[in-house]
Amino acid sequence: MKLHTIDTGFFKLDGGAMFGVVPKTMWQKLVPPDENNLCTWAMRCLLIEDDKKLTLIDNGIGDKQDDKFLSHYHLHGDDTLDKSLAKLGFSRADITDVFLTHLHFDHCGGSIIREGEKLKPAFENARYWSNEQHWQWAVAPNDREKASFLKENILPIQESGQLNFVETKDGVDFAENVRIRFAFGHTDAMMLPQIQYKGRTIVYMADLLPSAAHLPLPYVMAYDMFPLQTLHEKKAFLEEALAGDFVLYFEHDAVNECATLQQTDKGIRVKETFKLSEL
């Protein structure tokens, strides 16, 4: 097995929304905002190369939305999904499996492309993976979350016949050396791949811990549907990750790709940061 970082560029989100009830005077020391209170975040995906399978975990925001939509998120940077795959000698046609941690637009927007008036899967040869509980949550969204679940990102996956579901059961195996953890605070039944790699346990954090700045327990996004649930999930996960010396792989941290943990007098915090390629 080989793991590869797939960078798809950066976008901006409101700092207050990203840190919830935490005052700006505190979070701005960790992630400095611009003059409009917007902070830069990565859309960092992960490619698992294993035997004859190429599994892509999440795929960024994509580029099929109109200019008005994209202008809200200030996409920038030189990296794209296609460029990152090409650097490794791959293309979208080589992807055999697309694993979607959840169906918010910044995680699954690259799943579908627009050709003229038609919407079609960007990965024509791949099986797409979600779970039925989260899928039902996404296709009939609540009023608070529906702006994140865009039907043009989601419904064409099912219409293509490429949609598959994993069992909604914590610890279920997805592939050899890949198990799935579930989290329910950010959105219903979000999936976090836990990967055994080079003797280490790596967890793709998705939106349970968007960045290293979100390690302190009260640092919970305003985007989370059930913030107290997130807090409990974070606490339990961080204790387990510290005890097991896990490597945390951050999807949205614009600076830090991976981190390990240590106990401090302020709680569990970052021990060291590094790139996945340095493992």
Image (spheres, rainbow, N blue to C red):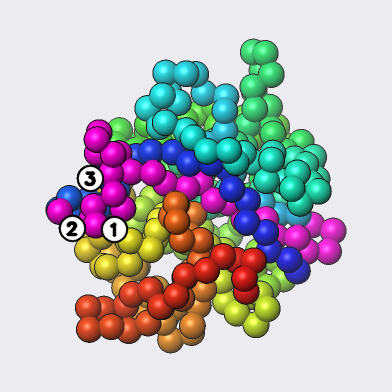
Q: Which residues are magenta?
A: 25-53
**Is 212 or 169 nearer to us in this picture?**
212
Q: Secondary structure at mark 3?
A: helix
According to the picture, the residue beneath numbered tag 2 turns out to be 26
Gap between marks 3 and 2 measured at Cα: 11 Å
Residue 127 visible, this orientation: no
Residue in view at x 51 percent, y 46 percent: 43
Gap between marks 1 and 3 measured at Cα: 13 Å
- First-in-chain label (1 vs 3): 3
Gap between marks 1 and 2 measured at Cα: 8 Å
Is 163 drawn above or below residue 226 in the view shown? Answer: above
Q: Amino acid at mark 2?
A: Met
Name the front one of labels 3 and 2: 2
Q: Secondary structure at mark 1?
A: loop
| Residue sitting farthest toward the top | 117
* Quadrant assignment, res 81: top right
> Residue 119, position in %: x, y?
64, 23
Is 137 drawn above or below residue 64 in the view shown? Answer: below
Q: Secondary structure at mark 2?
A: helix
According to the picture, the residue beneath numbered tag 3 turns out to be 16
According to the picture, the residue beneath numbered tag 1 turns out to be 30
Residue 70: say if magenta.
no
